[in-house]
Image (spheres, helix red, strand yellow):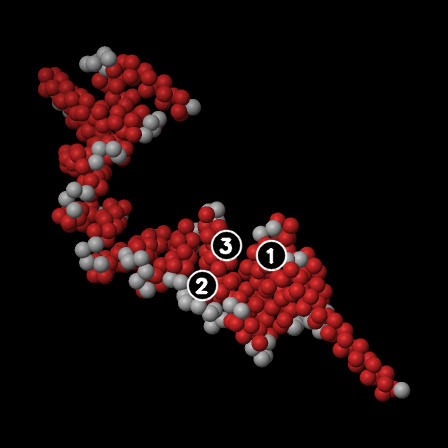
Protein backbone atom coordinates (compact mmCIF):
# COMPACT_ATOMS: atom_id res chain seq x y z
CA UNK A 1 0.00 0.00 0.00
CA UNK A 2 2.86 2.36 0.84
CA UNK A 3 4.54 1.57 -2.45
CA UNK A 4 1.31 2.23 -4.34
CA UNK A 5 0.92 5.61 -2.57
CA UNK A 6 4.49 6.64 -3.46
CA UNK A 7 3.93 5.68 -7.06
CA UNK A 8 0.63 7.59 -7.14
CA UNK A 9 2.35 10.69 -5.65
CA UNK A 10 5.10 10.51 -8.25
CA UNK A 11 2.52 10.27 -11.03
CA UNK A 12 0.65 13.28 -9.61
CA UNK A 13 3.83 15.36 -9.39
CA UNK A 14 4.79 14.44 -12.95
CA UNK A 15 1.34 15.25 -14.23
CA UNK A 16 1.49 18.60 -12.41
CA UNK A 17 4.79 19.43 -14.08
CA UNK A 18 3.43 18.38 -17.43
CA UNK A 19 0.36 20.50 -16.85
CA UNK A 20 2.47 23.60 -16.23
CA UNK A 21 4.72 22.84 -19.19
CA UNK A 22 1.55 22.37 -21.15
CA UNK A 23 0.82 26.05 -20.44
CA UNK A 24 3.85 26.86 -22.58
CA UNK A 25 2.53 24.70 -25.40
CA UNK A 26 -0.84 26.41 -25.06
CA UNK A 27 0.80 29.81 -25.13
CA UNK A 28 2.60 28.95 -28.37
CA UNK A 29 -0.69 27.76 -29.85
CA UNK A 30 -2.47 30.97 -28.78
CA UNK A 31 0.34 33.04 -30.32
CA UNK A 32 -0.14 31.25 -33.64
CA UNK A 33 -3.86 32.00 -33.42
CA UNK A 34 -3.25 35.67 -32.61
CA UNK A 35 -4.96 35.29 -29.21
CA UNK A 36 -2.26 37.19 -27.37
CA UNK A 37 -4.38 37.89 -24.30
CA UNK A 38 -4.80 34.13 -23.74
CA UNK A 39 -1.11 33.55 -24.52
CA UNK A 40 -0.21 36.13 -21.88
CA UNK A 41 -2.33 34.37 -19.25
CA UNK A 42 -0.81 30.97 -20.05
CA UNK A 43 2.75 32.32 -19.91
CA UNK A 44 2.15 34.10 -16.60
CA UNK A 45 1.17 30.78 -15.07
CA UNK A 46 4.24 29.10 -16.54
CA UNK A 47 6.52 31.86 -15.19
CA UNK A 48 5.61 31.17 -11.55
CA UNK A 49 5.58 27.36 -11.44
CA UNK A 50 8.73 25.62 -10.24
CA UNK A 51 8.70 23.12 -13.08
CA UNK A 52 8.34 25.64 -15.91
CA UNK A 53 9.72 28.99 -14.72
CA UNK A 54 13.29 27.97 -15.54
CA UNK A 55 12.50 25.85 -18.58
CA UNK A 56 14.15 26.97 -21.82
CA UNK A 57 10.91 26.52 -23.79
CA UNK A 58 9.19 29.01 -21.51
CA UNK A 59 11.66 31.68 -22.61
CA UNK A 60 11.44 30.60 -26.22
CA UNK A 61 7.66 31.06 -25.96
CA UNK A 62 8.21 34.46 -24.34
CA UNK A 63 10.36 35.49 -27.31
CA UNK A 64 7.64 34.41 -29.72
CA UNK A 65 5.02 36.23 -27.63
CA UNK A 66 6.94 39.52 -27.48
CA UNK A 67 7.68 39.44 -31.19
CA UNK A 68 4.00 38.74 -31.91
CA UNK A 69 3.03 41.75 -29.78
CA UNK A 70 5.17 43.97 -32.01
CA UNK A 71 3.89 42.41 -35.21
CA UNK A 72 0.25 42.73 -34.11
CA UNK A 73 0.61 46.53 -33.95
CA UNK A 74 -2.57 46.65 -31.86
CA UNK A 75 -2.92 49.30 -29.10
CA UNK A 76 -4.75 46.84 -26.82
CA UNK A 77 -1.50 44.84 -26.50
CA UNK A 78 0.77 47.83 -25.83
CA UNK A 79 0.86 47.20 -22.09
CA UNK A 80 2.08 43.63 -22.56
CA UNK A 81 5.67 44.64 -23.39
CA UNK A 82 7.70 47.79 -22.81
CA UNK A 83 10.14 47.02 -25.62
CA UNK A 84 8.70 44.00 -27.45
CA UNK A 85 11.56 43.33 -29.88
CA UNK A 86 14.27 43.94 -27.31
CA UNK A 87 12.46 41.66 -24.86
CA UNK A 88 11.97 39.04 -27.58
CA UNK A 89 15.69 38.98 -28.38
CA UNK A 90 16.64 38.76 -24.69
CA UNK A 91 14.17 35.89 -24.19
CA UNK A 92 15.46 33.94 -27.20
CA UNK A 93 19.05 34.36 -26.04
CA UNK A 94 18.15 33.20 -22.53
CA UNK A 95 16.34 30.18 -23.95
CA UNK A 96 19.45 29.25 -25.94
CA UNK A 97 21.69 29.63 -22.89
CA UNK A 98 19.39 27.38 -20.79
CA UNK A 99 19.13 24.61 -23.41
CA UNK A 100 22.00 22.13 -22.93
CA UNK A 101 21.18 20.13 -26.07
CA UNK A 102 20.92 23.11 -28.43
CA UNK A 103 17.41 22.32 -29.63
CA UNK A 104 16.27 25.94 -29.30
CA UNK A 105 19.21 27.25 -31.30
CA UNK A 106 18.50 24.68 -34.01
CA UNK A 107 14.83 25.69 -34.04
CA UNK A 108 15.72 29.38 -34.35
CA UNK A 109 18.08 28.70 -37.28
CA UNK A 110 15.80 26.22 -39.05
CA UNK A 111 12.73 28.45 -38.80
CA UNK A 112 14.77 31.59 -39.59
CA UNK A 113 13.37 33.25 -36.48
CA UNK A 114 16.30 35.64 -36.19
CA UNK A 115 15.86 36.63 -39.82
CA UNK A 116 12.28 37.61 -39.01
CA UNK A 117 13.39 39.44 -35.86
CA UNK A 118 16.07 41.35 -37.78
CA UNK A 119 13.48 42.49 -40.33
CA UNK A 120 11.19 43.62 -37.51
CA UNK A 121 14.03 45.58 -35.93
CA UNK A 122 14.82 47.23 -39.26
CA UNK A 123 11.16 48.24 -39.59
CA UNK A 124 11.06 49.52 -36.01
CA UNK A 125 14.31 51.43 -36.47
CA UNK A 126 13.06 53.04 -39.68
CA UNK A 127 9.80 54.12 -38.02
CA UNK A 128 11.69 55.57 -35.07
CA UNK A 129 14.07 57.41 -37.38
CA UNK A 130 11.17 58.91 -39.33
CA UNK A 131 9.66 60.03 -36.02
CA UNK A 132 12.98 61.73 -35.11
CA UNK A 133 13.54 59.23 -32.28
CA UNK A 134 17.17 58.81 -33.27
CA UNK A 135 18.30 57.21 -30.00
CA UNK A 136 15.50 54.65 -30.29
CA UNK A 137 16.38 54.03 -33.94
CA UNK A 138 20.01 53.43 -32.98
CA UNK A 139 18.95 50.87 -30.40
CA UNK A 140 16.87 49.01 -33.00
CA UNK A 141 19.59 49.08 -35.67
CA UNK A 142 22.32 48.09 -33.20
CA UNK A 143 20.29 45.05 -32.09
CA UNK A 144 19.64 44.18 -35.72
CA UNK A 145 23.39 44.24 -36.35
CA UNK A 146 24.09 42.08 -33.29
CA UNK A 147 21.57 39.51 -34.51
CA UNK A 148 22.76 39.39 -38.11
CA UNK A 149 26.38 39.03 -37.01
CA UNK A 150 25.49 36.00 -34.85
CA UNK A 151 25.67 32.34 -35.86
CA UNK A 152 21.90 32.05 -35.39
CA UNK A 153 21.18 34.25 -38.40
CA UNK A 154 20.64 32.35 -41.64
CA UNK A 155 21.50 34.82 -44.38
CA UNK A 156 23.93 37.35 -45.78
CA UNK A 157 24.87 40.48 -43.86
CA UNK A 158 23.36 43.70 -45.26
CA UNK A 159 26.00 46.43 -45.34
CA UNK A 160 23.32 49.11 -45.34
CA UNK A 161 22.37 48.32 -41.75
CA UNK A 162 25.70 49.73 -40.53
CA UNK A 163 25.00 52.94 -42.42
CA UNK A 164 21.51 53.16 -40.93
CA UNK A 165 22.98 52.74 -37.46
CA UNK A 166 25.59 55.40 -38.20
CA UNK A 167 22.94 57.89 -39.31
CA UNK A 168 20.87 57.23 -36.19
CA UNK A 169 23.97 57.61 -34.01
CA UNK A 170 25.17 60.88 -35.54
CA UNK A 171 21.66 62.35 -35.38
CA UNK A 172 21.36 61.38 -31.71
CA UNK A 173 24.82 62.88 -31.07
CA UNK A 174 26.25 59.50 -30.05
CA UNK A 175 29.37 60.23 -32.02
CA UNK A 176 31.54 57.32 -30.86
CA UNK A 177 28.90 54.88 -32.11
CA UNK A 178 28.61 56.88 -35.32
CA UNK A 179 32.37 56.58 -35.89
CA UNK A 180 32.20 52.81 -35.29
CA UNK A 181 29.41 52.23 -37.79
CA UNK A 182 30.55 54.67 -40.46
CA UNK A 183 34.10 53.32 -40.26
CA UNK A 184 32.67 49.83 -40.80
CA UNK A 185 30.98 51.11 -43.97
CA UNK A 186 34.20 52.79 -45.05
CA UNK A 187 36.19 49.58 -44.50
CA UNK A 188 33.62 47.70 -46.60
CA UNK A 189 33.85 50.34 -49.37
CA UNK A 190 30.15 51.12 -49.00
CA UNK A 191 28.94 54.40 -50.59
CA UNK A 192 32.42 55.53 -51.56
CA UNK A 193 33.65 58.64 -49.80
CA UNK A 194 30.38 59.40 -47.99
CA UNK A 195 30.95 57.38 -44.78
CA UNK A 196 34.52 58.74 -44.59
CA UNK A 197 33.15 62.28 -44.55
CA UNK A 198 30.69 61.24 -41.84
CA UNK A 199 33.50 59.80 -39.72
CA UNK A 200 35.17 63.21 -39.97
CA UNK A 201 31.90 64.96 -39.04
CA UNK A 202 31.55 62.65 -36.03
CA UNK A 203 35.02 63.60 -34.80
CA UNK A 204 33.97 67.22 -35.19
CA UNK A 205 30.84 66.43 -33.19
CA UNK A 206 33.06 65.10 -30.41
CA UNK A 207 35.06 68.32 -30.54
CA UNK A 208 38.21 66.36 -31.43
CA UNK A 209 39.52 68.69 -34.13
CA UNK A 210 42.96 67.06 -34.11
CA UNK A 211 41.60 63.65 -35.13
CA UNK A 212 39.11 65.29 -37.48
CA UNK A 213 41.87 67.18 -39.31
CA UNK A 214 44.15 64.14 -39.43
CA UNK A 215 41.37 61.95 -40.79
CA UNK A 216 40.41 64.53 -43.40
CA UNK A 217 43.99 65.14 -44.55
CA UNK A 218 44.37 61.41 -45.23
CA UNK A 219 41.34 61.25 -47.54
CA UNK A 220 43.10 62.66 -50.66
CA UNK A 221 45.32 59.55 -50.49
CA UNK A 222 42.23 57.33 -50.57
CA UNK A 223 40.24 59.44 -53.03
CA UNK A 224 42.71 61.35 -55.23
CA UNK A 225 41.13 64.12 -57.25
CA UNK A 226 37.85 64.08 -55.31
CA UNK A 227 36.79 67.70 -54.96
CA UNK A 228 34.49 66.87 -52.04
CA UNK A 229 37.53 66.34 -49.82
CA UNK A 230 38.91 69.72 -50.81
CA UNK A 231 35.59 71.38 -50.00
CA UNK A 232 35.57 69.74 -46.57
CA UNK A 233 39.13 70.92 -45.94
CA UNK A 234 38.11 74.47 -46.90
CA UNK A 235 35.17 74.29 -44.52
CA UNK A 236 37.34 72.86 -41.73
CA UNK A 237 40.01 75.57 -42.00
CA UNK A 238 37.44 78.35 -42.30
CA UNK A 239 35.77 77.15 -39.10
CA UNK A 240 39.17 76.78 -37.44
CA UNK A 241 39.97 80.41 -38.41
CA UNK A 242 43.01 79.34 -40.43
CA UNK A 243 42.60 81.48 -43.56
CA UNK A 244 45.98 80.65 -45.06
CA UNK A 245 45.24 76.93 -45.15
CA UNK A 246 41.69 77.62 -46.34
CA UNK A 247 42.98 79.82 -49.17
CA UNK A 248 45.40 77.08 -50.22
CA UNK A 249 42.57 74.60 -50.74
CA UNK A 250 40.25 77.20 -52.28
CA UNK A 251 42.90 77.86 -54.91
CA UNK A 252 43.26 74.13 -55.55
CA UNK A 253 39.52 73.71 -55.85
CA UNK A 254 39.15 76.64 -58.24
CA UNK A 255 41.77 75.13 -60.52
CA UNK A 256 39.80 71.89 -60.62
CA UNK A 257 36.36 73.53 -60.85
CA UNK A 258 36.67 77.18 -61.95
CA UNK A 259 32.90 77.70 -62.31
CA UNK A 260 31.92 76.53 -58.83
CA UNK A 261 30.12 79.51 -57.30
CA UNK A 262 30.43 78.10 -53.76
CA UNK A 263 34.22 78.41 -53.87
CA UNK A 264 34.02 82.13 -54.62
CA UNK A 265 31.40 82.51 -51.91
CA UNK A 266 33.65 80.76 -49.38
CA UNK A 267 36.60 82.94 -50.35
CA UNK A 268 34.44 86.06 -50.19
CA UNK A 269 33.15 85.32 -46.69
CA UNK A 270 36.68 84.50 -45.55
CA UNK A 271 37.95 87.86 -46.81
CA UNK A 272 34.92 89.64 -45.32
CA UNK A 273 35.72 88.16 -41.90
CA UNK A 274 39.26 89.48 -42.28
CA UNK A 275 37.96 92.95 -43.23
CA UNK A 276 39.58 92.62 -46.64
CA UNK A 277 36.60 94.25 -48.30
CA UNK A 278 37.85 94.68 -51.85
CA UNK A 279 38.89 91.04 -52.06
CA UNK A 280 35.56 89.98 -50.56
CA UNK A 281 33.63 92.10 -53.07
CA UNK A 282 35.56 90.63 -56.01
CA UNK A 283 34.99 87.03 -54.91
CA UNK A 284 31.30 87.48 -54.04
CA UNK A 285 30.64 89.35 -57.26
CA UNK A 286 32.06 86.42 -59.22
CA UNK A 287 29.95 83.99 -57.19
CA UNK A 288 26.80 85.95 -58.08
CA UNK A 289 27.80 86.02 -61.74
CA UNK A 290 27.84 82.23 -61.63
CA UNK A 291 24.65 81.84 -59.55
CA UNK A 292 22.51 84.85 -58.70
CA UNK A 293 19.58 83.31 -56.81
CA UNK A 294 21.15 82.64 -53.41
CA UNK A 295 20.27 84.74 -50.38
CA UNK A 296 23.58 84.18 -48.61
CA UNK A 297 25.67 85.45 -51.54
CA UNK A 298 23.49 88.48 -52.18
CA UNK A 299 23.43 89.37 -48.49
CA UNK A 300 27.17 88.73 -48.21
CA UNK A 301 28.02 91.10 -51.05
CA UNK A 302 25.68 93.74 -49.66
CA UNK A 303 27.35 93.38 -46.26
CA UNK A 304 30.80 93.69 -47.85
CA UNK A 305 29.85 97.04 -49.41
CA UNK A 306 28.24 98.25 -46.15
CA UNK A 307 31.26 97.30 -44.05
CA UNK A 308 33.63 98.89 -46.54
CA UNK A 309 31.58 102.10 -46.49
CA UNK A 310 31.47 102.11 -42.67
CA UNK A 311 35.26 101.75 -42.60
CA UNK A 312 35.56 104.66 -45.05
CA UNK A 313 33.41 106.81 -42.75
CA UNK A 314 35.64 106.04 -39.78
CA UNK A 315 38.68 107.11 -41.76
CA UNK A 316 36.88 110.23 -42.96
CA UNK A 317 36.39 111.34 -39.36
CA UNK A 318 40.16 111.74 -39.03
CA UNK A 319 40.32 114.19 -41.96
CA UNK A 320 40.64 117.81 -40.81
CA UNK A 321 40.29 119.52 -44.17
CA UNK A 322 36.58 120.25 -44.85
CA UNK A 323 36.73 119.70 -48.60
CA UNK A 324 38.64 116.46 -48.27
CA UNK A 325 36.24 115.31 -45.56
CA UNK A 326 33.21 116.06 -47.77
CA UNK A 327 34.75 114.15 -50.66
CA UNK A 328 35.52 111.19 -48.38
CA UNK A 329 31.93 111.11 -47.08
CA UNK A 330 30.59 111.26 -50.65
CA UNK A 331 32.85 108.37 -51.61
CA UNK A 332 31.61 106.35 -48.63
CA UNK A 333 27.98 107.08 -49.52
CA UNK A 334 28.57 105.92 -53.09
CA UNK A 335 29.81 102.60 -51.69
CA UNK A 336 26.72 102.38 -49.46
CA UNK A 337 24.62 102.86 -52.60
CA UNK A 338 26.31 99.86 -54.22
CA UNK A 339 25.06 97.67 -51.39
CA UNK A 340 21.42 98.57 -52.03
CA UNK A 341 20.54 96.29 -55.00
CA UNK A 342 22.14 93.27 -53.33
CA UNK A 343 20.30 93.77 -50.05
CA UNK A 344 17.04 94.28 -51.94
CA UNK A 345 17.68 91.06 -53.86
CA UNK A 346 18.47 89.26 -50.60
CA UNK A 347 15.12 90.36 -49.17
CA UNK A 348 13.37 89.25 -52.36
CA UNK A 349 14.92 85.81 -52.00
CA UNK A 350 14.12 85.62 -48.27
CA UNK A 351 11.09 87.81 -47.58
CA UNK A 352 10.75 89.26 -44.09
CA UNK A 353 14.36 88.43 -43.20
CA UNK A 354 15.12 90.77 -40.29
CA UNK A 355 18.83 91.02 -41.13
CA UNK A 356 18.18 92.19 -44.67
CA UNK A 357 15.44 94.53 -43.42
CA UNK A 358 17.74 96.11 -40.83
CA UNK A 359 20.43 96.65 -43.45
CA UNK A 360 17.91 98.15 -45.88
CA UNK A 361 16.50 100.44 -43.21
CA UNK A 362 19.99 101.81 -42.61
CA UNK A 363 20.68 102.16 -46.34
CA UNK A 364 17.38 103.89 -47.12
CA UNK A 365 17.93 106.28 -44.20
CA UNK A 366 21.44 107.19 -45.32
CA UNK A 367 20.64 107.52 -49.02
CA UNK A 368 17.23 109.24 -48.88
CA UNK A 369 18.72 112.73 -48.64
CA UNK A 370 20.21 112.28 -52.08
CA UNK A 371 17.26 110.27 -53.39
CA UNK A 372 13.96 111.37 -51.79
CA UNK A 373 12.12 108.48 -53.48
CA UNK A 374 13.71 106.24 -50.87
CA UNK A 375 11.67 107.89 -48.09
CA UNK A 376 8.67 105.68 -48.79
CA UNK A 377 10.81 102.56 -48.82
CA UNK A 378 12.42 103.61 -45.57
CA UNK A 379 9.02 104.01 -43.86
CA UNK A 380 7.75 100.69 -45.26
CA UNK A 381 10.88 98.87 -44.15
CA UNK A 382 10.79 100.41 -40.69
CA UNK A 383 7.11 99.47 -40.25
CA UNK A 384 7.65 95.90 -41.42
CA UNK A 385 10.67 95.47 -39.17
CA UNK A 386 8.69 96.79 -36.21
CA UNK A 387 5.95 94.22 -36.89
CA UNK A 388 8.40 91.34 -37.07
CA UNK A 389 10.32 92.35 -33.96
CA UNK A 390 7.27 92.76 -31.73
Q: Is residue 250 above or below residue 384?
A: below
Q: Please rate how many residues cluster around mark 1, counting C-alpha atoms within 10 Å: few if below 14, some from 14 to 19, many from 20.
A: many
Residue 339 lies in quadrant: top left
Percent position of residue 181, x then y: 38, 60
The answer to whether marks 1 and 3 mark residues whose Cβ atoms lie closer than 8 Å is no
Residue at the spot of label 3: 124
Locate the C terminus by quadrant.
top left
Q: Please rate how many residues cluster around mark 3, counting C-alpha atoms within 10 Å: few if below 14, some from 14 to 19, many from 20.
A: some
Report the Cα–Cα distance between label 1 and label 3. 13 Å
The residue under the point 51% across, 62% down is 116
Percent position of residue 75, x then y: 62, 49
- Taking depth in this image into account, of 156 and 233 the one nearest to the observer is 156
Query: Circle 3 sits in a helix, a strand or a loop, which is it?
Result: helix
**Mark number, residue 363:** none
The residue under the point 64% across, 50% down is 76
Residue at the spot of label 2: 145
In the visual, does 96 lie left or right of 211? Answer: right
Amino acid sequence: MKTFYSLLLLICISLGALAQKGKVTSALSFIEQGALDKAKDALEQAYVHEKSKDWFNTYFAKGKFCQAVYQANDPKYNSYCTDPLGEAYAAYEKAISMDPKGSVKKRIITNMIYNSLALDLYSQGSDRFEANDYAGALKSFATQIEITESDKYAGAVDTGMYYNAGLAAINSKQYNDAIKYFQKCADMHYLGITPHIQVYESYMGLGDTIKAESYLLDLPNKFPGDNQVILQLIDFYLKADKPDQAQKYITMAKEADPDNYSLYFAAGIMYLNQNNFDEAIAELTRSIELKNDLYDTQYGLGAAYINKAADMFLKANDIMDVNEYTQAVEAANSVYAKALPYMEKALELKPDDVYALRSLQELYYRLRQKDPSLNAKYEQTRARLSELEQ
